[in-house]
Amino acid sequence: MPGKIPQNPPRSRVAPPFPHQYYRLLQINCAEIAAIIIALGPQEKEKILLRILFVTSEAFPLIKTGGLADVSGSLPAALRNLGEDVRLLIPGYRQVLEKLRNPRILLELQWLPIVGNVTLIAGEMPDTGVPVMAIACPQLYERDGGPYLDPEGREWLDNPLRFGILSRVAAILGSHVSPLANWIPDIVHFNDWQGGLTPAFMRYSGAPCAKSVLGIHNLAFQGNCAEEWVEKLGLPPEAFHIEGLEYYGQLSFLKAGVYYADSITTVSPTYAAEIQTPEFGFGMQGLLATRSEHIHGILNGIDTTEWNPTGDPHLFHPYDTEHLDQKQLIKRELQQRLGLAQNADAPLLGIVSRLTHQKGLDLFLECAAPLLARGCQIALLGGGEPLLEHGFWRLSLNHPQQVGVSIGYNEPLSHQIMAGADIFIMPSRFEPCGLNQMYGLRYGTPPVVRRTGGLADSVCDATEASLEDGSATGFVFDLADRQALLNCVQRAIDLYHDKPVWEKIQRNGMVRDLGWNHSASIYRDVYRSLL
Ligand code: ADP
């Protein structure tokens, strides 16, 4: 693949004259930087153009398994809209190299652990034009299967190498000895465990480096592996220590990130507090608590162009707050597609989700009988744990007119369920942010959610008071148990049959500002505070 790509030397960026509206920081020494920053007034500081390397293992629309891809597709674009200079670094999976716009060879990096050389391919995101650098290394990334799992759903055995290389390349590009001398970032924002070794490589490189920010999207995935990987990946043995990379006798990519990053962000304010407690900390709560003052909870935005009921290419009937009746047509098509009874009045409960214990859908399965007895329908799209897949399959076989199940990944159907369902179900045991509940709000499909993480921060429970003041957008319950969930869904169904109130709740959610503008500016403040 890289052989077919036209060679194109790195374009040098013409530095603006100094002083200027924008200043480049890293091509002058630290004392000069400090002197300039102190001399700048608040308004001038605002105008400093940041160079941000955004390191991710997935990004929509190049490749997606979950919410990280959505954020990686939309946050960098929002930061660019604010005027910042962001580039993405991502493994060169086959899909990425195929979808990249205008791909060209940028440079070759040598002396990497085990693999030797990799090629950096430059290109742009197909939709937003955000610049991307993909690491082409066919032996690591160009395989059948997913980014993390093989076609049988097992973790790739060489994941430590695959994402060790991602981290290592990020650290090289984030250092002042980077071969990409005309684009040295101020900030390396790496995400989840897959980028976790980045600040460790930076620390042990001996070179001056960019500031590092770890974005935690889900603490449950930690990238823990055998100690032998420390040496294999070229990290010094002394780094394998409780004050470093070691986590209960293993190398932990995520712990390395938490330990060495200059700053830590996570995807909602509530989750930022939750991860410092034993219930949600997955064993890292103690370390996270010691880093408390460096942790920032910033609620994710959504891509309001991609998720827009007035212009969604996956829907035949666009709608907005004034044309909610169009939703009925989409509901009918969805019923047809899933083989459900064409019943306009049956409350249609939608689910789009990874099927894992985290998402609490086992609790929903336990509630299904009374809900079906009440005349509800269920439309589920998802995949994951076999027990849950079978549970929903069985339910649909027993109630074909009321339960439609599609196992697998299907982007168009996810939009159609979001628009065609009446109520969106998301009873997660924990949820760092969650995007689907926000898509539900935007599509006039009020969500039923558990009060945790980003669900607590984005959905306002319909109570007398919130209905009165116009803030009610959905239905929230506290305990992760069957009865609490069932009561909450029943509450939603009661109001669903009260059309004027229901439409009010739909409209409240649809007009909420769910885009990235506000949150992107908070990210920018975090980056600036590090410089
Ligand atoms: P998580 O990242 O924990 O899976 P989020 O709610 O943050 O959960 O994001 C999930 C994203 O993945 C959403 O964009 C959702 O629509 C999408 N998604 C999940 N499962 C599927 C599926 N089976 N088909 C299509 N999209 C899916």
Image (spheres, rainbow, N blue to C red):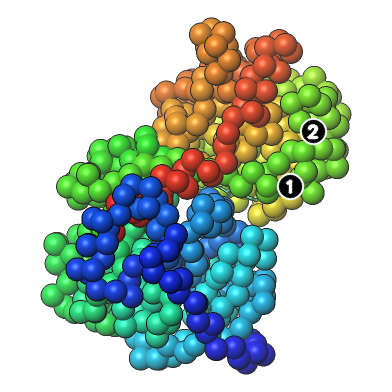
Looking at the picture, which amino acid does disc 1 mark?
A: Leu
Q: Quadrant of residue 372?
A: top right
In the picture, the disc for residue 319 is 2
Q: In this orientation, does residue 508 appear? A: yes
Image coordinates for residue 289, horizontal then vertical, percent: 20, 44
Tell me what residue is drawn at x 57 percent, y 23 percent: 474
115 horizontally vs 339: left or right: left
Q: Is residue 447 left or right of residue 168?
A: right
Res 414 quadrant in image: top right
Is the CB atom of the residue marked by disc 1 within 8 angstroms of ligand 1's nearest atom? yes
Q: Earlier in the sequence, mark 1 or mark 2?
A: 2
Residue 188 in the image: state x and y as whole percent: 37, 65
Q: Disc 2 marks which amino acid?
A: Tyr
Question: Which residue is depicted at the point 71% across and 18% down?
Answer: 503
Q: Alpha-carbon distance for marks 1 and 2?
A: 17 Å
Left or right: where does residue 313 sit relative to residue 200? right
For mark 1, give the secondary structure.
Answer: helix
**Residue placed under numbered mark 1 in the picture:** 413
